[in-house]
Structures are given as structure tokens and as C-alpha cells.
Image: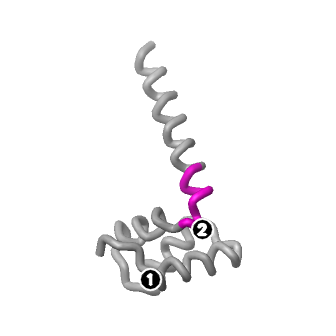
Amino acid sequence: MNESLPEVQFRLAELKQTGAHAVAAIKTIRDEFHLSLGEAKLQFSRSPTWAPEQAAAEQLLQQVVYAFRAEDAK
């Protein structure tokens, strides 16, 4: 399953609107649509509704990686 599923994307939008956080949204679509964890995370990452959270998570990851590399360089 390599494409974004419209029904999953619709459900992700509903979850966002009701105040769910990212982990709860992934768990919900995993359970409701019988997806593997990897597929649920992939669907989440493709969700335009959750793009701001994805961007913030990516930025945080980059900061952590940079901090570890700086610490290793010492």
C-alpha cells in the first residue's frame, strides 16, 4: 500500500479537528483501518492536515542529531 488512502486522510483530518495528538491519531487509524504500524505512520506522514506537526517533528529531530554530533565532536 504505497498511496495515500482518502478515507484514512479524511479520518486523520477528523482526529486533528477533535484535538487528538499525533500518537493517538496514528494508533486510531492503525486500529480502525487494520494497518501495520509502518503503514499507519506513512499515512500520517502524507497527511496535509498534520503537515505542521510533521515539520515541527522533523525540525526537532534535526536539532537533536546536530546536538549529538556536536557532542561527539568534542
Residue 53 is covered by the magenta coloring: yes
Q: Which color scheme is applied?
A: one colour
Look at the image and tell me in which quarter the N terminus lies. bottom left
Which element type, helix, strand or loop, lies under badge 2?
helix
| Residue 73 image-quadrant placement | top left
> Residue at image x 60%, y 76%?
13
> What x and y, as percent, mark residue 23?
54, 66
Name the dominant secondary structure of the magenta segment. Answer: helix
Residue 68 is covered by the magenta coloring: no
Q: Gap in Å between the C-alphas at discs 2 and 1?
A: 20 Å
Marker disc for residue 49: 2
Is 66 situated above or below 50? Answer: above
Marker disc for residue 31: 1
Circle 2 crowding by C-alpha within 10 Å: few under 14, some 14–19, many from 20: some
Between 21 and 58, the one nearer to me in the picture: 58
**Amino acid bearing label 1:** Asp
**Amino acid bearing label 2:** Thr
> Residue at image x 46%, y 34%?
65
Which element type, helix, strand or loop, lies under badge 1?
helix
Give the farthest residue toward the left: 1
> What x and y, as percent, mark residue 67?
51, 28
- Left or right of residue 46, residue 19 in this image: right
> What x and y, as percent, mark residue 53?
60, 57
Is 68 situated above or below 59? Answer: above
| Residue 14 image-quadrant placement | bottom right
Q: Which residues are magenta?
A: 48-55
> What x and y, as percent, mark residue 58?
51, 47
